[in-house]
Image: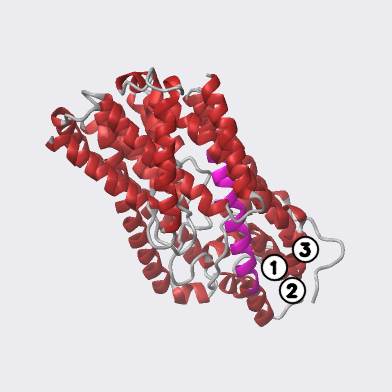
Amino acid sequence: MTAPATPRALPMGTATRMFLRMLAVQSSWNYETMLGTGIGFSVEPALRALQGGRGGEQYRAALARETHYFNAHPYLAAVAVGALARVELDGTMPPAQIERFRIALCGPLGSVGDRLVWAGWLPFTVLIALLAYGLGAGPVVVVTLFLVLYNVGHFGLRAWGLHTGWTHGMRVAGSLATPALRRGPEYVARAVMGLCGLALPLAAARILGQRAVIALHFDRATVLGAHALVFLLLAIAALLGLALVRLHGRLDGWRVALVIVALLALHSVVT
Amino acid sequence: MLTTILAFALLAALLGLDVVSFPQAMVSRPIVASTLAGALGGSASDGLLAGVFLEMMALETLPVGASRYPEWGTASVVGGALYVSRRGDATSALLFAMLGAMLTAWAGGWSMYALRRLNGRWTKRALTSLEAGNSRAVTGLQMRGLAADLLRGFLLGFIALALLLPLTALAVAHGHGDSARIRAVLVAVAVAVAGSAAWKLSHGSKHGPWFFLGGLAVGCAMLLQS
């Protein structure tokens, strides 16, 4: 019932096909089976090695199972893809147990992925890009920096997931308790907070530029000199930001921004 | 005009696909998508400026599974295209480009919801084949989903630009707002949304608020020294 101590290597061609298919794991995402079809699509190249080959009885039964309901973070779904390919090919686990194993993977792979990637790595790399912009970097540097940094983590996580899933099979849950996944989100969250404080004033200052400062006559009026407008706006932004934090769960920040921008546009045309 | 809109709509389709379907490499993030639209329209720097604004607005959007959220990929191409295609005051154009992009993001969220429902109907229809372990049915569903998402992004980008390009030109021509003040309000709103988003995502971390204040102190000190 458990994975063999020495894992068979996943053939390079099969691993590559699975990896490429995983990039489209969400392309038929729906509210009924969610990632289900995508998981079946990604596991399929490995299932061809089952007895009877492509179209054989074992292959068809396994593929049918793998297209059932599944939900997880799309990058960490790679862990499930590797592990499910392994248990299907081992052939030692009864179908009902494979189904239970699939369902058991959903929760951890969803919550760890959301915290690590969507709430951690993505804002971290975005804020690095905003910091680069604030420091005066041009479009090529900002875009390249963001894409390279983000995707080192992105593709690395997918490749690690597939390898780990395949290596550990049904014991894969233990690999989610590695220090990087357990403590990583905490460290990244701190970096996000620090970067947020650092990047936003610099980006705001660059957007405003010297012309806007002079136009509002703030440059010589206060002890803060040419940056008075930036500090004033940061204070206003802080108040609005605090209100948005207090309204968390009830009102989205972008909706509030949409209303303000619409009113500003209306004012600009009407007056 | 039509050729320009078609070119931007194609870019919107490709980048809209990246949001969820393929390959989620974040080329659909506003800071990238708007810059690419700017480059296509002749000024990557202008695209980047619009992208920075939209990125701050989009920071709080988590593309989490079943939740309905604004689709910023296609919207950022529209925002970048509107800004780079301006005739007249740059700040007024930025204001209307932001408004156009945010409305497109909102409509994009609805289009993604509709696509997911459509995928659900296709999956239900293919259930017998899926239960029989038919690999063609599996591949067919994936490919159909990809094609439909590509078409969704294209149509959304095309319709948004066809409507908003002339409207933006008209609004910019009739806009009388103080450019510096408009830009200042836009910056304040964008910083507020981005700051609150980062706070909501990360303040629970140990000493998180202190890291934020530390970063803010360094940022302000750098600003004063510049």
Instruction: Quadrant for the C terminus of chain A, please.
Output: top left
Q: Is disc 1 placed on a helix, strand or loop?
A: loop
Using residue A159 as the reference point, say whether residue A271 is left or right of it. Answer: left
Q: Is residue A111 magenta?
A: yes
Q: In this view, does A177 lie to the left or right of A38?
A: right
A24 versus B43 height, above or below: below
Q: Around disc 3, counting alpha carbons within 10 Å, would you say few (fewer than 14), some (14 to 19), or many (20 or more)?
A: many
Relative to B56, say whether B223 is above or below: above
Residue A18, compared with residue B159, is above or below; it is below
Q: What residue type is labelled 3?
A: His
User: Which of the two residues, A165 or B77, is positioned nearer the viewer here?
Assistant: B77
Going by the numbered disc 2, the residue's amino acid type is: Gly
Residue tagged 3? A168
Task: Please say which color scheme the image uses.
Answer: secondary structure
- Letter of the chain that mark 3 sits on in the rendering: A
Instruction: Report whether mark 1 lies on the same chain as mark 2.
Output: yes
Q: Give the range drawn in magenta.
A: A104-126
A245 lies left or right of B155:
right
Estimate the x, y position of residue A223 in percent, counting from the top left. Answer: 45, 22
Q: Looking at the rendered structure, which numbered label has been put on residue A50?
A: 1
Which label number is shown at residue A91? 2
Query: B79 or A159, which lies in front?
Result: B79
Closest to the camera, between mark 2 and mark 3, is 3
Name the residue at 32% across, 52% down.
B106
Measuring 40% from the left and 56% from the top, which residue is drawn there? B69
Secondary structure of the residue carrying numbered label 3? helix
Chain of the residue where label 1 is placed in the rendered structure: A
